[in-house]
Image: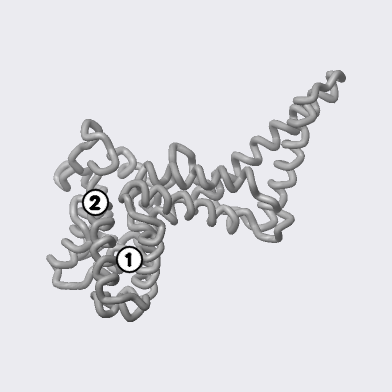
Amino acid sequence: MTSRVGGLEILAPLSVDEERQLYSVIVRGRECALLLEGGVADNARRRRLSQQRHAGQEAESRLLRATLGLVRTRVHERGYRFGNEELEAAGVEGLANALRRFDPARGVRFATYANYWIVKLVNQAIQTQTGISDAEMRLVLALDKLRRAHPTTNYGEAEVARALSLSASRARELLATSRDIEARRYEPAAFTDDTELHEPPATTDAPAWVISALKRLCGEDFDAFWQHSFRTTSLEELARARGITRQGIAKRLERCRSAVRASADAARLQEWFDRQ
């Protein structure tokens, strides 16, 4: 549903051929920029070079915006479902780094190369926010990957120790760290100035068409989707209230999100959510 990251519009992903075509324009634009910096006496040639430089800059902008969806995806994977400005900014910075460093001669497409830099800087931003070490971050990511691979399994201390080859005490520490990060994901005050915080709208304050559409799409999980959308309730709290596992409620919410994204009202709903 989300159409913008860091104020930039997310464009549809490009095909491999489209990436290659754009990058040839980018390379030529950069060459022209260097030539112009060295000075060009002929006015007609200077205009041609300026046009090609501008075309290269436009191509860079399109390539970047067409890859912005990766930033939102990587942030969502970390559990920050409705965005975190600091993490998204880190992801955009990673994307910009990739654009500066990318060499098509390596034989990989730009989106693949950019994904490395996006993940790297998003993870670094999470470490900064939570104050954990590189080693702790690697274990947290390993646990996240394990949970995504087996969403119906409830990973306690013994299961984590066995799956990740850790001692019982280390597994216990990892679970504690993971819970701490999970708690931070639902505390906006940890990442934004208190003066910018606002209460999420009550369902009675939302337009009738919004509530009607979401109830139709989410069914019995509407309340959970609404609470989680505005980060007023954690996955653990939602799961406990319904007597199911964290993974179970996560799967239900993902089904809601998929239904909303695929609906005819997706664009209108996103526009409304963005204004809240």
Foreground of the two, 66 or 175: 175
Q: Amino acid at mark 2?
A: Tyr
Q: Amino acid at mark 1?
A: Arg
Question: What quarter of the picture does the C terminus occupy?
Answer: top left
Please tell me how crowded label 1 is: few (under 14), some (14-19), or many (20+) other residues with Cα within 10 Å.
some
Residue 163 position within the rendered picture, expressed as x and y whole percent measured from the top left? 35, 79
Q: Is residue 122 left or right of residue 219?
A: right
Can residue 73 be seen in the rendering of this structure?
Answer: yes
Residue in front for this viewpoint, 128 or 210: 128
Could you give the CA–CA distance between mark 2 and mark 1, rounded to whole angstroms?
20 Å
Q: Which residue is mark 1?
A: 255
Dot 2, crowdedness within 10 Å: few (<14), some or many (≥20)? some
Farthest-out residue, right: 42
SS for tag 1? helix
Judged from the image, the secondary structure of the residue bearing numbered disc 2 is loop
Q: Is residue 163 left or right of residue 190?
A: right
162 or 205: nearer the viewer: 162
Q: How far across and how far down the image is residue 205, in percent?
A: 17, 41
Which residue has dot 2 on it? 186
> Residue 259: which quarter of the image?
bottom left
How far from the left and from the top, in percent, is residue 6? 43, 39
Instruction: Please say whether residue 263 is visible from this viewpoint.
Output: no
Q: Is residue 78 above or below residue 172?
A: above
Point out which mark residue 211 bears.
none
Does the CB distance between marks 2 and 1 fall below 8 Å? no
Which residue is painted at 27% across and 54% down in the image?
Answer: 213
First in sequence, mark 2 or 1: give its number: 2
* Residue at the spot 80% in from the left edge and 28% down from the top edge: 48
Say which residue appears at 47% left-offset and 49% top-offset: 121
Total tally of numbered discs in the picture: 2
